[in-house]
Amino acid sequence: MSTHDLRVFLGIWAGIFALFLLSGVLLHDHYRIWAIVGLGVALALQAYPKASHPLYIAQIKIGSILGWCISRATLVVLFALVFVPLGLVFKLARRDTLAPKLHNDSYLIKRDKQPTSMKNQF
């Protein structure tokens, strides 16, 4: 992990804390102490970004766990809201798209006499 990457990481967090601080001041007319502390820590660590490496690793691990959980939850909601109702509508309409019916006239060749040799079948 390069110091440039860690500085970008700290800059993003400094921006996030600055947005929380500004939203508290502009919308609620009070300062959020935790946003001030977070902004101060993020800006102070810009001087020595290697100290933020454990924070970066922790964020990556937590983000991976959250991403795994959110992707599973999204797939469950998608299945419940899209595929289950669609399956019920198809079931009520008696439509089975996975089992196409064969038409005997177009697929089957009726033979009077079975071939005696396997040569030149087609």
Image (tube, grey):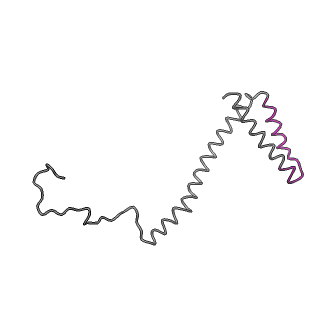
On screen, 14 above or below 75? above
Q: Residue at x 74, y 39 (%)?
A: 12
Tally of marks: 0
Left or right? Give the position of 1 relative to 24.
left
Examine the structure image and report whether residue 63 is included in the region drawn in magenta.
Answer: no
Q: Position of residue 73 (x, y in %)?
A: 59, 54
Helix, strand or loop: magenta stretch: helix
On screen, 41 above or below 31? above
Q: Residue at x 85, y 41 (%)?
A: 36
The part of the chain drawn in magenta is 23-46
Q: Residue 60, located in which quarter of the rendered image?
A: top right
Q: Position of residue 101 (x, y in %)?
A: 33, 65
Q: Residue at x 64, y 39 (%)?
A: 61
Q: Residue 81, located in which quarter of the rendered image?
A: bottom right
On screen, 32 above or below 81? above
Left or right? Give the position of 90 relative to 22.
left
Q: Position of residue 116 (x, y in %)?
A: 10, 54
Q: Position of residue 22 (x, y in %)?
A: 84, 47
Examine the structure image and report whether residue 29 is included in the region drawn in magenta.
Answer: yes
On screen, 10 above or below 108? above
Q: Residue at x 68, y 39 (%)?
A: 59
Left or right? Give the position of 72 relative to 57.
left
* Viewer-proximal residue among 83 and 112: 112
